[in-house]
């Protein structure tokens, strides 16, 4: 395992621990969704900006030539991202309470779905070890972006439907 992989796994572990910790803190207190639900879309915008800058950095790295992965690899990464986002969207629910506010119904399967996503990513990283690091990074970012975009945009649409009813 090289230094960049160690850093990548370290960041992934920190993110996982933070997600589990934040989820466990929120279980007892229900809070309504604020700002007309637009906060749900912030991760999509942030990821788009971060991934765009990362791809730009990858394409301008003089030590490693950049080339796009094969079309079938991009298609599979896109399909995996769409499926994972669809699973999360399916399990995301909202309810409108007596006070007129819309609340998120906690998803008891969220932790397991997150662990499954991590396991799939680790399995794919083992499977695609033959790819160069820039191609693998592009495929991983594409899968992650589509997963988050489908989940967050779909959740926003679900929220707006519940709010309008």
Image (cartoon, rainbow, N blue to C red):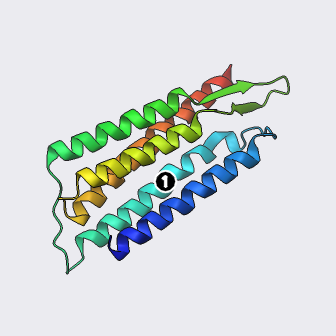
Image quadrant where one finds the C terminus: top right
Side of 50 where 109 appears, left or right: right
The residue under label 1 is 45
Residue lying at the far front in this picture: please name it. Answer: 1
The location of residue 67, given as percent across then percent down, is 15, 62
Label 1 crowd (10 A; few <14 / some 14-19 / many >=20) = few
Residue lying at the far top in this picture: please name it. Answer: 165
Residue lying at the far bottom in this picture: please name it. Answer: 62
Side of 22 where 67 appears, left or right: left
Residue 43 vs residue 134, the one in the foreground: 134
**Whether residue 139 is visible:** no
Instruction: Choose top left, top right, bottom left or bottom right for residue 57.
Output: bottom left
Residue 82 vs residue 1, the one in the foreground: 1
In this view, 151 is above or below 127 = above
Instruction: Choose top left, top right, bottom left or bottom right for residue 131.
Output: bottom left
In this view, 138 is above or below 157 = below
Side of 148 where 55 appears, left or right: left
The location of residue 104, given as percent across then percent down, is 69, 33
Residue 124 vs residue 80, the one in the foreground: 124
**Whether residue 126 is visible:** yes
Residue at horizontal 73%, vertical 32%? 103
The location of residue 13, given as percent across then percent down, is 52, 60
Q: Which element is circle 1 on?
A: helix
The location of residue 77, given as percent across then percent down, is 28, 44
């Amino acid at each position: 395992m090289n230094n960049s992989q160690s850093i990548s796994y370290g960041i992934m572990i920190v993110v996982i621990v933070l997600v589990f910790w934040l989820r466990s803190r929120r279980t007892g207190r229900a809070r309504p969704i604020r700002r007309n639900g637009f906060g749900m879309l912030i991760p999509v915008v942030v990821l788009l900006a971060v991934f765009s800058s990362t791809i730009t950095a990858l394409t301008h790295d003089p030590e490693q030539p950049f080339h796009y992965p094969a079309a079938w690899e991009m298609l599979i990464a896109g399909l995996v991202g769409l499926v994972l986002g669809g699973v999360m969207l399916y399990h995301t629910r909202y309810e409108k309470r007596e006070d007129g506010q819309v609340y998120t119904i906690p998803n008891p399967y969220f932790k397991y779905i997150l662990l499954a996503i991590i396991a799939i990513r680790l399995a794919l990283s083992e499977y695609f070890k033959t790819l160069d690091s820039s191609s693998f990074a592009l495929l991983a970012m594409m899968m992650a972006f589509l997963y988050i975009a489908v989940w967050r945009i779909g959740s926003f649409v679900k929220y707006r439907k519940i709010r309008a009813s």
